[in-house]
Image: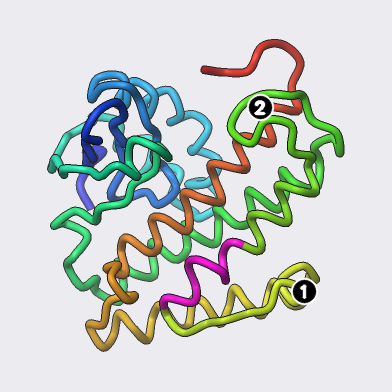
Amino acid sequence: MTDSLRVVLELGKKRRVVAGAMDWPGLDRWGTSADDALDKLSSYLPRYAGVAERAGMGGAFVRARDVEVVERVPGSSSTDFWGIAHVPSQIERDVLSPDDLQRRLDLLRACWAYFDDVAARVSEELRWGGRGGGRSRDSIIRHVYGTEPGQFSRKVGVRTELDVVLTPDGLATHRQEFLDAIRAYNAEGEPARTWPIQFLVRRTAHHVMDHGWELEDRDQPGPLPL
């Protein structure tokens, strides 16, 4: 770990750039240019600080405020369409040490806890706007919990039925099995199908945080953030 905020830029072919913080899973933002994406990422540092604090890394996160672009990756049409990272960087292809992996998994756990807390306190009916338009709180929660086994954990062999993850005990069991599978794949140097393990952790955490922040934004009075 360095005291800089290492960022990878994924450059869409036409209109979007994704900036991802390599050492802080869940901290990804997109913009219409590299500078715009970096500005958006920087604006979310105070919001991500709560995740770092939950993971016991608040001090390290405060120190890592000097943004350093360490790689630029050509994106795809999906980068432009979704504003989400779709192409793993070279940095993310490295097999993680057990300590580095555990650090990232602690942050993923913190992202899960953050989302769960937000989901429990926001209003059932949310303001219209943002990605997802008029989806209700419960619809977003169902989407987040259901997408994880549908798109992410299955890449390391964890296939959990939707009705299971929609129960508290089932969700907790699923998450533990997912973490255990990530550790096992990383120990063998195996990718998560076409994704490196680092990228899997990053994308899983991003999906949780993106919708957690959406819930917060749509629960607040006033205009939605850009």
Which residue is labeled 2 in the image?
A: 217
Mark drawn on residue 193? none
Q: Quadrant of residue 124?
A: top right
72 w.r.t. 224: above or below: below
Q: Nearer the viewer, mark 1 or mark 2?
A: 1
Q: Camera-side residue: 45 or 149?
A: 149
Q: Residue at x 28, y 70 (%)?
A: 194
Q: Camera-side residue: 2 or 27?
A: 27
Magenta portion: prevailing SS class: helix
**Disc 2 residue type?**
Asp
- Residue 47, image x, y percentages: 53, 32
- Residue 192, image x, y percentages: 34, 75
Q: Residue at x 79, y 30 (%)?
A: 126
Mark drawn on residue 163? 1
Q: Quadrant of residue 110?
A: bottom right
Question: Is-magenta flag for residue 150?
Answer: yes
Distance CA(mark 1)–CA(mark 2): 28 Å
Question: Is-magenta flag for residue 117?
Answer: no
Mark 2 lies on a secondary structure that is helix
Q: Residue at x 24, y 56 (%)?
A: 88
Mark 1 lies on a secondary structure that is helix
The mark that comes first in sequence, 1 or 2, is 1
Q: Residue at x 63, y 79 (%)?
A: 160
- Residue 217, image x, y percentages: 66, 27
Q: Quadrant of residue 45?
A: top left
Whether pointer 1 and pointer 2 mark residues with C-beta atoms closer than 8 Å, the reply is no
Are there few (<14), some (14-19), or many (20+) residues within 10 Å of tag 2? some
Magenta stretch, residue numbers: 147-155
**Disc 1 residue type?**
Asp
